[in-house]
Amino acid sequence: MAQQAAPGRGRLPAELTSFIGRQDELAALTGLLTRSRLVTVTGPGGVGKSRLALRAAAAAAEPGFLVEVDQVQDPLLLGHAVLEALGLTDSTARPPLEVLLEQLADRRLLLVLDGCEHLVGPAADLAGALLRGVPGLRVLATSRERLRADGEHLLTLDPLPETGACELFADRAAALLPGFRLDEANRAQITLLCRRLDGIPLAVELAAGRLSALSVQQITDRLDDRFRLLTGGSRTALPRHQTLRTTIGWSHELCTAQERLLWSRLTVFAGAVDLEAVEYVCAGDGIDPSEVLDCVGGLVAKSVLLRTDEGDTVRYRLLDTLRDYGAQWLRATGEHQRLKRRHRDWFLGLATWGEVEWFGPRQLATAERTTRAHSNLRAALEFCLAEPGEEQLALLLAGTLWYFWVGCGHLGEGRHWLDRALALAPEATEARAKALWVTGYMATLQGDPGRALPVLEECRNLALDTGDDRALAYALHRLGCAALIGDQPERAAELFGDALWHYDAVGELNSNVLMAMFELGLALIFQGELDKGEHWMARVRELCEEHGEQWAYSYGLYAMAYSNWLAGEVRLARVRATECVRLNHLFRDLVGAVLGLELLALLATEEVAAGEGAAAESADLAEARLLQGAAHRIWQAVGVPLFGSRNFNGLHLECEARARSGLPAAEFAAAFERGAALDLDEAVARVLSRATVPVPPCALERTEPPRPGEVAARLG
């Protein structure tokens, strides 16, 4: 079962500009959504399908979630995109559709599938399957053509009437020229212009963007010149789709040479992008790096680029219609492949930079930055897999992103890319070795030893054959993990020890190395060697505080809390287990969070005597059982509960026995059901609300790793 990030709340973007006109269409669409479970808004590019759909979704009774289908090129990733849009995390190897059907079964929500025209078939299949399996679901799609799915109702969106088009023009003009308004002096000229533009909203907005340099009369005259060239003087011969293309082409001509070039080059990006990426990928050969910012500003002013503010970061994106136009120019220039490689280099650099920053105080910022780049990382991976000769870079990029696949809840997608890359690149290379251990790591977390053990053994053999000591360390480490959850703590400790020796020999120190120390300590604790285990826990804590590392530290807290419980230090164990849950929740790491919940459930069965200024704490068996119910739900999203391990399961069984013996049967069952009804966020909120003493955060030390552009430059 997947875990959701925002229960009861939708995920729709805020409107950046005012919504003009379309009241009749909005009412019609709202009415269709109340009567139909699948509605598709169709119409030509630039007519305002997305804007209308989002406005209707915002007014719907159910929480709405936007899936930007236009950013997904591989139909196999459509389900992953829906999971991501819903804020769902699933760490199993199950197909996304199965996860969605399970998680959404009892929920009411509205799913907005925006921009389906390039994936009509897959979008129809997914919508149909979800609607059949989720009674409380409604789907609102936008597409230039209908989905042709069962039960589909259509709303065909026409251009704006003259009045609405004029109001839109005046509104956008006022944003550019404060004080501009529609009045008797300009009404006739604006009406004529909007009539020339057939009331197509995108065309109207593009024309309004020219008011900084031209008058309404000049805009109209120049458009008329273009139309006459296309039709031989017959304005009525110009179809609406040609009107939009002509308007875009005219806007293109009115850009400077550098702006036109930048427009075409920006089409290699998928979704929104920041200025640094634009400067690296698009500068050169006609655009001086110092000119990029001015060109971006010019395209924003002309309504070609949309600007969005995301926290402290400004990002830019092209509308699909403008992207399509620019992409044709890019292909015509013969620069397409070169720009794709520049794009690949930047995002490989971003991933490499992220892997470096993951070991340090900027882990959370790294997770956010990589999440924002997700659609572009997909585009880079797809390019590497589709372009002959790029397979090794596909392995490198997919392997380098291990921290994102594991730490940000994308194990299924990570396996998708790695499996494809491994199949295409069988050569015994360093990149393959890394991809093998990352695949084995993720398969182990998913409870898939049938995949994990063979690839880890292949990695070890490859490392021995090629003398790759670093890959050997990782292979031994992850084989140790398999032994640990396979109830072979002695064998696991041996493998972890060997891995740490090799890590030290090659000078490796990062989050994975700290995890090996934590896992070695846990293997020793499982063997009853508390002193030795606590020695390794202390080492993990020391290094985490020195480097500001929090992800591995959260796992160290789990082991320290477990050791504290064994030593009878229940109060300290509760504090550490609570902090373990809190930190893992920040990273969306389900494994760490559920381990902490399992331990807190057991600790809730313990009574704590008063001491050192702290009040006594009584056992709460109902709370213990409730937490077990919450953990049970999360385990369904991870894989086999407690990894199927006797050692890990011992805590659970002890807690269950205590609760069963101290609670009436009905209360025992009811508490579990109440816990199982909680999603991850609700369970964590409950734990934190009941915490009494917070754990001081790590003493973070800021480090400055290389920028993505520097990494990309080093890659040549």
Image (tube, grey):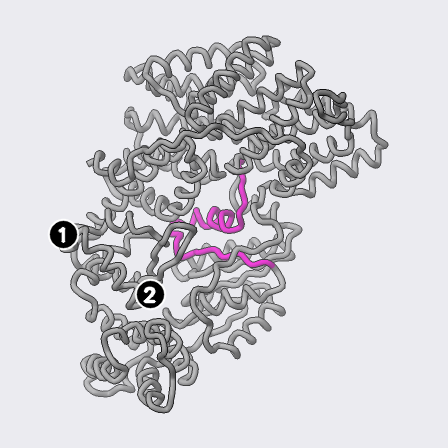
Q: Nearer the viewer, residue 160 or 273?
A: 273
Question: How many C-alpha atoms fall within 10 Å of the one at disc 2: few (<14), some, or many (≥20)?
Answer: some
Q: Quadrant of residue 701?
A: top left
Is 74 one of the magenta-colored residues?
yes
- Residue type at the position of mark 1: Asp
- State the image coordinates of residue 264 (x, y, percent, origin top left): 23, 59
Category of crowding for the residue at label 1, using alpha-carbon neighbours closer than 10 angstroms: few (below 14), some (14–19), many (at least 20):
few
Q: Quadrant of residue 218?
A: bottom left
Residue 76 in view: yes
Q: Quadrant of the N terminus?
A: top right
- Residue 667 coordinates in the image, percent (x, y): 82, 36
Q: Residue furthest right?
A: 664
Residue visible at 13% across and 52% down? Answer: 285
Disc 2 element? helix
Q: Is residue 399 visible?
A: no
Q: Is residue 482 above or below residue 57?
A: above
Asked if 466 appears above or below 409 in the picture, the reply is: above
Looking at the rendered structure, the kind of residue marked 2 is: Thr
Q: Residue at x 40, y 43 (%)?
A: 369
Q: Is residue 32 left or right of residue 274?
A: right
In the picture of the structure, the residue carrying the numbered disc 1 is 285
- Residue 268 magenta: no
Report the side of 529 relative to 41 (left or right): right
Q: For the view shown, which residue lies furthest in the left direction?
A: 285
What residue sits right under mark 2 in the picture? 321
**Residue 568: image location, x then y, percent:** 69, 16
Please state the horizontal and vertical placement of residue 710, each as a whole percent of the image: 24, 37
Image vertical order of residue 86 relative to residue 494, above or below: below
Read off the magenta span. Answer: 63-92
Instruction: State how far apart marks 1 and 2 are (Cα).
Output: 25 Å
